[in-house]
Structure formats: structure tokens, C-alpha cells
Amino acid sequence: MPDLLLELRSEEIPAGMQRKAAGDLKKLLTDAMVEAGLTYEGAREYWTPRRLTLDIRGVTARSADVREEKKGPRTDANEKAIDGFLRAAGLTSISQAHVHSDPKKGDFYVAHLVKPGRAAEAIVADVMPGIIRNFPWPRSMRSGVASARPGALRWVRPLQSIVCTFGPENEETQVIAFEVDGLVAGNVTYGHRFHAPDAITVRRFSDYVEKLERAKVVLDAERRKEIIAADAGNLAFASGLELVEDPALLEEVSGLVEWPVVLMGTFDEGDLSIPSEIIRLTIKTNQKCFVTRRPGEDTLSHHFILVSNIEAKDGGKEIVHGNGKVVRARLSDARHFWTRDQSDLPDLETLRRSAEAFDLDLAKPLDQRMAKLDALNVTFHAKLGTEGARVRRIRALAADLCAVTGADPKLVDRAVVLSKADLRTEAVGEFPELQGIMGRKYALLQGETETVATAIAEHRKPQGPTDVVPTDPVSLTVALADKLDTLVGFWAIDEKPTGSKDPFALRRAALGVVRMLLERKIRAGLVSLFRMHGPRVVADIKAGDARAFETEHTADLLSFFHDRLKVYLRDLGARHDLIDAVLAAGPSSTLRAPSPHLRGEGEESAEGAASFSPQAGRRWPEGSDEGHAAGNDDLLTVARRVEALTAFVTSEEGLNLLAGTKRATQLLAAEEKKGAVVTDTVDPALFALPAEGELYAAVSTATSAAAEAVAGEDFRAAMEALSTLRAPIDRFFADVLVNDDDPAIRANRLALLGRIRAATGTVADFSRIAG
């Protein structure tokens, strides 16, 4: 079967676009081929800075013929209807149609049409111009004389040539010729821009790769990465050093060269007094170079690794010299930033008001930067006010959270106040990714405790599903307060994620909160937190109107957290139906455990997790819902219930409970759908059969035992207590007709089943569990 080789060669493609562009090209072409009736055995994409290449193997030579039947009018139809059928079917005479009979509809005409298959070459030539013209580049440009014409080709960089050959492995290939803006596909490409600028004629992928290699082009990006990593590691090792690995930089550099040549340069050893993070980012950002260090040491060496795209005649001496000059100049700037950030600001007198508002010491450089951040009214978000206002809100929320995490309120407050201060440092201004990192360094330099400095560095963690969760209580408190303020704020201004769009990374922030609560075993009622913190946000954005956070905001934000919790638990292997069953179960008035949020300071739950008490002896604001506090806004409790339910439903007791409960809940649902009202009251005097009394007694006993287990947060024990209902439920359904002719007896029996549903519903909504 023939193979297809396609190459689109252009000026240098930005490194960050290459991998996706090659994948897009493969998907667009293979999808178009399949849609046209072609099949293929395999396809692989390749890319270099100057070309996107596809190798598609085992393509069918032509698409299959397509046969279809087109139904026409009855044989006794008028001439106008028959003429219309002939035109639609592409027939010249009715004699070309067939007559089919139907017992009900009689005889009617049918056209048997055959759409001939097409050669693969014709299909590729037909679809490729459209793919190239409509290619989904994030940014594109027009170039050359043709760019002045309407509809001129847009490409990421000027497109220079197209290769498209097709043929079996052991036979001569042919060119699939098509034209795009004056460029005609052929079998000629070009190698390295400097080492091999002459034209190269290719036939199929194997000799294409071989000839490019001789022309100083390594086609496979993964191989280029391996060459760079290996050569860089060996070069560092030869100098008694080790390479500081950087996967993102390696990916980028492999997209900057077609023929990687690894060299080593140096900078002044005196610049090593600059923090390693600044040195590394300076060299990486400005020169795309790797840094090195002594084996086993954290600090860097003054040697760096660069990757050239040419084999210089002088062995790379001039390339190394030129890169070294630039690196030394950039590090000189970095040293200036580092020094300036530790000196006093020139306008301290204008910062006294802000310093008093945040209890800042203007003798300390980082405190000065925080005062400057507030005094300048630096905007956090157009609708959410300034960074200073946000820090004030986070201070208040963090103070509330201290009882949850057991953190020292004074250390938490100090960490919150300084957490955003490095935004006004020159180092972070040059390298925003150093936010927090530089704050920690500057905090230690001015005498802050290690705990406060670490909290400053970690206050935005975790920033992704693989990022670490803070462990220190102070860091945990600050990080929770920061993310919760962000989420409540954006919900207050109705700037929520929609579909795949999440410009403010709110899903990531919510997942971070979920991870902190679950992985650090934090008990916190989110609804009460939203209701406490919402008015603070509203007061800032509504010019002092501190009305309560809207109920719909609270419910919607809690639902958003539930969605993130589902994602987190599913990634850990939890079944989606069990998660839904737990979240759908509301707290019961009969089985409600004492609210964990109202325990005294220092008390802990049965499993050792701190409970939420904003301040010793403090109660939630009027109108707070204790049901919510003990229900599904405590994500740690939800996760424990899911864990217990997962273990329980696979056991014999769990299967018994599930089977019996489902029968009761399904019957109740059917009756309620008909309009029946299920009351909460069961009257034993209306029992007509022994099975009713047995079930009533069993439900009462199981409910009491389950309530005690729920109060102790032993959900497995609660479910085991409820599982004893299976036998009396079976006897009830065997002996009792629920829909009795007597309305009072019927209502009483439905109420008895309602007690079963209410009892089990405190753990999970069993009707949502599959199986």
C-alpha cells in the first residue's frame, strides 16, 4: 500500500507553536482523508523550526465506490414529479430507474446510484489547499507580492515550499501536485539554512530523513532533545559539574535549532552572590541557556550551557564569547535589581498612612514595598478593587481561619500583610514568576521568622494538580484565605468560568482549596465562610454597601466546589455514582450530628481534624444554616463519606442495604410522581399486619444507632446499622400491600417507607447508586 510524505517548509516557526501545529496538521489531513473514504495504517508528525512534516503509511490507493438508493415517486405520478426525480437522481430517462413494490404504497421508482471512488492523489490534492489556507495558527501573517491581493494566504511565517509525494515502498513515487498562492507542491526541499542551502530531491520518508540528516537537519524533535540533554550533561560532567534540568527550556530550545551544537560559557563568579533563582531566570529568559551547579549543591556555578544551530569553524569560540557578553550584561541588571530591592525607597514620608493601616515598619525594605503597593492603589481587578483592599480582606479571612488550621494568628497576620509586598520589587517586576520566592528571600534578610517567610513563598500554592500543598499551619492558612477571597470575589462580580474558558484560573483555585482541606484534614463549612466573607467583598466593590453575600452566589459557589471535589475524588479512583449519591444526601433533622463548626477552641473531631470555630465562643452570623454546616459544604466529611460508602457497597451488607432501600425509594418516587404526599409521621395504631410493626421497630433502632455513629463521624458504622433493615424490608414487601384501599393506612405505610429513605439519606442517596 502506498505511503504519503508531506512537508510544509517556511521561515522559522515560534518554538511554542511547533508541536501543536504538527499535531493539528496530522489531524486535519487524516480526518479529511477518512471522510473522503480513504484509510491508512498509521500517521506520525514531525517538526523543526522550519518545517512541519507528516509520514502517513499504508494509505488505500483509492476510496471505495459508494452505492445508494434514491427513492422516487409512484409509477402513476404525473410527468412533472417524474421529471423532478430524474433531475435529482442525475438520470436521463425513467428507464434507468428501477420499480419497487410496497404492499401499502404500491409501485414506485428507485434510482440505484453508484458514486465512483476517487484516487487518493486526487483526494489529497483536493483537500490540502483548504487545510493550508485555513490552518489554525494562533497568529499568522501575509507575505510577498501576493499579500496585497484579497484572500492572500496567511501563515505563521512566510511559507516557502511544499513537498507532497505518494507511492508504494518499493516502487517509484509520484508528486501530488496542488497549488496554494503560487506555491506548487513538488519533491524538492532544502536542508540547514547555512550548512546545506542547496535543493534536495526526495521520494519517500526514508530517504527524506536520510538526506535531511546529511544536510544537517535532525527531523525528530524528541531526538534533538535527547542530543541536547546528553551533550549538555556530558559537557557539564567533564567540567566537574551537573546540569540543572529544565524540561520546559529543553522543549523550547529543541524548537530553535535544526542541528543542535552544545557549548559551554561562563560569567563572572562575583555574580553568584545574586540569588540562584534570579540567575537561572535571567540566563533562561534572555539567552535560552541552561545553568549548572556542583554535584550535590544547591547554589549554581558560573558556567552555563548554550545550544547553537551551527557548527562554527572556530569550534564555537565566538558564539560562546557573544553569549557570555549578553549574560554578563543581563546579570549586571539583575544585581542592580537585587541591590535596589534591599535599599530604602526615596518617598517614605508619603507612605506613613499606609504603613499605619497595615502595621508596617518603614525601617524594613519589604514593609516599605507593601506600603508603596497600597499607596499607589495598584489594581488587582477593575471590579474587585486594589491589591491593598484585597490584602485587608485576606487578613480578616485568615484571622477567621486560624482556629481551623491551628496557626498562630500573629504570624498569619504578618505573613498576609507581606505576602504581596514583592509585587513592588524590581526583581519581581522583571520576572513575575519569582513572586513569593523573592518575598521569602527579602523577608529573611529583614529578620522575619522562617515560618512567615515560608508562608510568603507558599501563599499561592498549590498552583496545579501536581504542585505541593503547604504543610505549615501558617502557610496553609494564608494560602486558603488567598484562594477563598479570589473565588468569593469573582462570584460576587459574576465573573465565573464558562465552558472551557477560565481566564482567572478559578477552577485551579477551587481545586487548590479542595486539596488543602482534604490532604491536610481541615474541617471548614464553606457556606458559613462565604456568608462571612461575602459582605467584606461587597463592601469594597459597592462603596461601603456591606449587604450579605447573595444566597444564589453561595449556592452556586458551593456547587462549583462540588464539581472540583468530584474531579479530585475521581482521579483518586472513586466512582462517580457514589460521589453523586453522597452529595445528593442532605443532612437529616433526626440524624444530624452536632455542628462541628460550633465546638470550642481546641476540640477535635473523632478522627483528629480541627473543627471550625472562627474565634473561641463565637457563633456564625444570624441566618447561617446549621444543616449546611454539618452537611455537604464540609468537603472533608463528604470525602470520608465517599470513602466509607465505596468500601461498604461492595460488601454483602452493603448490597443488602442497597437492594432494600432502592425498592422503597423507587416506590415512593413513583407515588410522589402521581401526587401523593409522604408525611413525616408514622402512627403505629394504624398497623394492620405484624410486618409493619417489625419494620417500624427496626427503623427506629437502626436510626438511633446510625445517629450515634454519624455523631462520631463513623459512617461505616452508620451504614452497617442501617443494613439491618434489609430483612424487615423484605418481609414488609412480601406481606404488605402498600397501596391499601384505606387512604389512612396507605398514607401511613408510605410514611413508614419515607422513614427508611430519610434514615439512609443521611449517608447517601441510594437511588443514585448504580447496580
Image: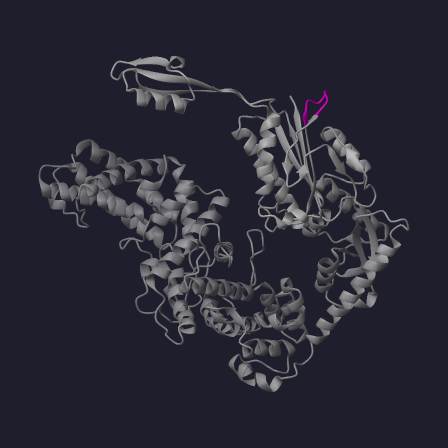
Is residue 629 at least partly visible in the picture? no
Q: Is residue 379 left or right of residue 435?
A: left
Where does residue 134 sit, x and y in percent of width and height? 57, 43
Identified at 81% across, 58% down, the residue is: 323
Where does residue 342 sit, x and y in percent of width and height? 69, 76
Q: Which residues lie in the magenta part?
A: 166-173
Q: Is residue 153 left or right of residue 235?
A: left
Extreme bottom residue here?
Answer: 349
Q: Nearer the viewer, residue 234 or 644?
A: 234
Whether 545 is among the magenta residues is no
Q: Is residue 731 left or right of residue 592?
A: left
Q: In this view, does 391 lie above or below 299?
A: below
Where does residue 149 sit, x and y in percent of width and height? 61, 48
Identified at 80% across, 50% down, the residue is: 308
Q: Which of 115 and 225 is in front in this view?
A: 115
Whether 168 is among the magenta residues is yes
Identified at 61% across, 82% down, the residue is: 362
Res 29 → quadrant: top right
Where does residue 742 sit, x and y in percent of width and height? 8, 39
Q: Quadrant of the C terminus?
A: top left
